[in-house]
DNA sequence: TGTTAAAGTGAAACAGGTTTCAGCACTCGC
DNA sequence: GCGAGTGCTGAAACCTGTTTCACTTTAACA
């Protein structure tokens, strides 16, 4: 058995790490202009100074690339949120506040959001592992926001999953111009009430 | 008020109506085999016996085509549901029952579901009117299932929107193999509890 | 230091969605 | 029946994601 398969993460050299970052940066730059469709693989390759073949070695498809981008952004968000946790008292309000903060970040870069969210929901089975990582990150952010004491109950995890569903889908409707910002806010607040239901106070 | 749905669209002749139906039928056939990617425009054109240019005259993009297909299916489902309304007592249970029925239908044709749902969530602004029609149909189905007496309250409409969000997103996670059937069931049941919250009993 | 396997490059080719266009075929008003 | 306009056809071309491949560079290491 050679080490041909992927032991989860191949150790990247410094140059490789730099290349990867250049690629992600170029993608974000292109995305923030024209959204999903503006992230064209040839353009990404050129902008980041790697060959097309190399780009595909790092990210096996455009969707992989964009999902990795989202992973990146979420990580950043997670750290920011750790530093400035939500101020509300009630868990449901804390989650709503956190999601609205993320939403406002997206409003600042709607095209970037478009590229990432569309990729995320369009991803097929071949991207499942990566999408799952994003999902776990999102879950972690929400659970953090809830600020609960011990391990979340199954009911709480269900509520969190539903919140995540609503979050993604509401973003889609907003990005495609079918829902207003206010509408999304209401939807988030509405779904966050589910958390109260799981609180055996 | 007649039952004409689109006043904007030119009235189709009989031959044109037949062509349109042939196209949709061919698409469904291809989709039920290989899902989203198997619905290839050249293949649809050939199977339905129209020229590629004609196909694009009827449906300006692949996503338009698949969204129209979903519209079709939803209409069918709506009629079926009218004939056999849910048997449960509680509104929330009735909605959950209805969605699970739809979900089972999708399980019978997962590839078909894949094509339709992926198209729906991937649709960009140019497809907004059509996606909106699908959304309204879905809303109507859920409201019907609730079996409420008068006009829905704003709170109820919010709950329905969130249910719709969860419905779409849960389907996506199931289709991409990241959630089990049981998981989707739980998510649906969880979100349907929101309906109880809006019941000023 | 020389060897070698993996990684990167560049260019071409392929695949499928979309556009274009010249010509034929229908339909409708005269 | 006749002309005009609109719809349909067929084929080619275009665009962008993806693959392929022969070749070069890099880096690890014997």
Image (spheres, coloured by chain):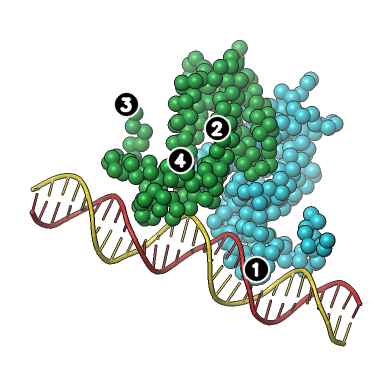
Chain colours: A cyan, B green, C yellow, D red
Residue at which label 4 appears: B69
Expressed as whole percent of the image width and height from the top left, the position of residue A106 reads 63, 46
Q: Is residue B73 visible?
A: yes
| Labelled pair 3, 2 in contact (Cβ < 8 Å) | no
At x 63%, y 20%, the residue is B197
Residue pictured at 74% horizontal, 24% vertical: A198
Q: CA distance from mark 2 to mark 4?
A: 15 Å
Outermost residue on the top side: it is B201
SS type, badge 2: helix
Mark 1, residues whose alpha carbon is within 10 Å: few (<14), some, or many (≥20)? few
Residue placed most toward the observer, A22 or A99: A22
Q: Earlier in the sequence, mark 3 or mark 2?
A: 3
Q: Earlier in the sequence, mark 3 or mark 4?
A: 3
Q: Residue A26: percent from the left, percent from the top?
A: 65, 62
Tags 1 and 2 on a common chain: no
Depth check, front residue: A101 or A75: A75
Mark 3 or 1: in front is: 1
């Amino acid at each position: 058995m050679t080490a041909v398969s992927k032991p989860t993460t191949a150790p990247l050299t410094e140059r490789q790490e730099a290349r990867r970052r250049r690629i992600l940066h170029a993608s974000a730059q292109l995305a923030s202009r024209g959204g999903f469709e503006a992230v064209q693989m040839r353009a990404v390759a050129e902008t980041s100074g790697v060959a097309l073949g190399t780009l595909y070695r790092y990210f096996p498809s455009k969707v992989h690339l964009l999902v990795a981008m989202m992973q990146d952004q979420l990580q950043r968000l997670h750290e920011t949120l750790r530093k400035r946790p939500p101020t509300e008292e009630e868990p449901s309000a804390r989650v709503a506040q956190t999601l609205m903060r993320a939403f406002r970040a997206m409003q600042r870069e709607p095209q970037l959001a478009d590229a990432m969210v569309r990729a995320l929901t369009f991803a097929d089975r071949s991207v499942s592992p990566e999408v799952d990582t994003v999902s776990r990150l999102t879950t972690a952010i929400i659970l953090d926001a809830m600020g609960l004491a011990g391990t979340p109950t199954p009911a709480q995890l269900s509520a969190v999953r539903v919140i995540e569903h609503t979050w993604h889908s509401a973003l889609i409707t907003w990005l495609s111009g079918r829902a207003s910002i206010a509408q999304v806010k209401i939807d988030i607040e509405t779904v966050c009430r589910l958390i109260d239901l799981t609180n055996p106070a």
